[in-house]
């Protein structure tokens, strides 16, 4: 009777429109002071659509720039010591490839990686931001430990949904180029042949190694990036970071992931190559590499991978952050 409030699930909601948000009330329940209406400069969650779009653009641009280093890295990892090594090193690999197939040979397999890089980065940043939005504190700060979990979740998601089939096709294309009579004439032809001969499972070879690699990759990268950003911002969580600083932090995060999980990358590459039938599983692959080639074989391709990944992560984070800033102004 003339009351300005009414019962609602044990709480109350002011009848005056707009009063509930002002008092920090949601769905009839008091809202914590830390979650009150955002003031100027307060943390704003990144919209999932923005994260997916920015991540996809960043991934597509990055892979077009850095693919030759990925090609060389894969070739060196496939060049087993059990057979006479075909390449003496990075420079020799580039020289032989250009000599045999022209400069375009360094881009063999780009199509499979390009088709996958856009959704891969979209899934990665979409999942990371989704998890981050649930784990940041009231000031929008993500702790180093929680960023590790967010990165791990992002890495596992991208491994299962995108990376494993994409990487399997890419490795088979590059390995096929070393054959006397290459059988894959292009991306669609190669995918069709792989599925015809091995079924859909043929595109999921090395899935365990891929999950381990991508999960650890993104856990290391995102936690390192978060740690550096938190250190740089200090007591001001809203302090802006220039693209140059972001690139330096991204390169550092990329280097940390290379030294941290290159052995898993070697295992993944071997399990996805044309000679993967030699291995019973990931553990057997690791055992055979250790027995036949020694422990240093687990770090094959480290130098070209280091160059590629540092550039990759730096470019991706810079483009992602700048696209997010642009979208925030227009979306």
Image (cartoon, rainbow, N blue to C red):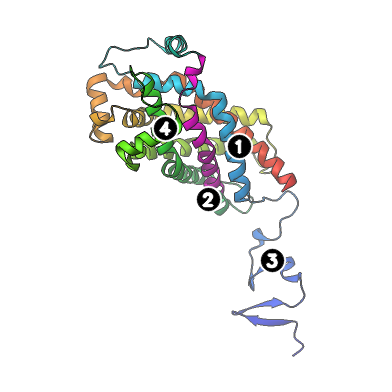
Looking at the image, is mark 2 or mark 4 nearer the viewer?
4
**Figure check: 256 above or below 79:** below
Which residues lie in the magenta part?
A: 103-129
Q: Which residue is mark 2?
A: 131
- Spatial CA span between label 1 and label 3: 37 Å
- Res. 96 mark: none
Asked if the residue at tag 4 contacts the one at tag 3, i.e. Cβ–Cβ closer than 8 Å, the answer is: no
* Label 1 CA crowd tier, 10 Å (few <14, some 14–19, many 20+): some
- Spatial CA span between label 3 and label 4: 58 Å
Asked if the residue at tag 3 contacts the one at tag 2, i.e. Cβ–Cβ closer than 8 Å, the answer is: no
Q: Which residue does the image show at 27% across and 20% down from the upper left?
A: 294
What is the x, y in percent for residue 18?
A: 76, 69
What is the x, y in percent for residue 135?
A: 54, 52
- Res. 57 mark: 1
- Spatial CA span between label 2 and label 4: 38 Å
Q: Which residue is mark 3?
A: 24
Of the pair 236 and 101, the residue shown nearer to us: 101
Residue 110 highlighted magenta (yes or no): yes
Residue 35, quarter of the rendered image: bottom right
Q: Which residue is mark 4?
A: 189
């Amino acid at each position: 009777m003339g009351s300005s409030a009414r019962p609602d699930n044990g709480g109350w909601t002011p009848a005056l429109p707009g009063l509930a948000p002002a008092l920090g009330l949601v769905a009839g329940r008091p809202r914590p002071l830390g979650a009150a209406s955002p003031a100027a400069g307060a943390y704003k969650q990144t919209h999932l659509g923005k994260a997916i779009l920015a991540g996809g653009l960043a991934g597509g641009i990055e892979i077009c720039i850095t693919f030759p280093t990925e090609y060389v890295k894969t070739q060196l990892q496939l060049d087993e010591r059990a057979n006479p090594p075909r390449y003496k090193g990075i420079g020799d690999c580039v020289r032989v490839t250009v000599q045999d197939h022209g400069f375009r040979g360094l881009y063999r397999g780009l199509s499979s990686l390009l088709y996958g890089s856009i959704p891969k980065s979209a899934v990665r940043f979409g999942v990371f931001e989704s998890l981050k939005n649930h784990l940041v504190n009231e000031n929008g700060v993500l702790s180093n430990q929680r960023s590790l979990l967010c990165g791990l979740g992002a890495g596992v998601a991208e491994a299962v949904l995108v990376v494993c089939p994409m990487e399997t096709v890419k490795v088979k294309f590059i390995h096929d180029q070393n054959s006397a009579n290459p059988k894959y004439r292009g991306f669609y032809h190669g995918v069709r042949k792989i599925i015809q001969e091995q079924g859909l499972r043929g595109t999921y070879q090395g899935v365990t190694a891929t999950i381990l690699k991508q999960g650890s990759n993104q856990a290391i990268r995102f936690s390192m990036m978060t740690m550096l950003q938190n250190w740089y911002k200090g007591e001001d969580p809203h302090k802006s970071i220039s693209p140059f600083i972001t690139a330096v932090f991204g390169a550092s995060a990329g280097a940390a992931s290379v030294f941290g999980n290159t052995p898993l990358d070697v295992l993944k590459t071997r399990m996805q190559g044309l000679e993967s039938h030699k291995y019973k599983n990931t553990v057997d692959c690791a055992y055979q590499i250790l027995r036949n080639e020694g422990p240093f074989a687990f770090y094959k391709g480290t130098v070209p991978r280091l160059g590629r990944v540092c550039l990759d992560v730096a470019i991706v984070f810079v483009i992602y952050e700048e696209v997010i800033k642009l979208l925030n102004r227009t979306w």
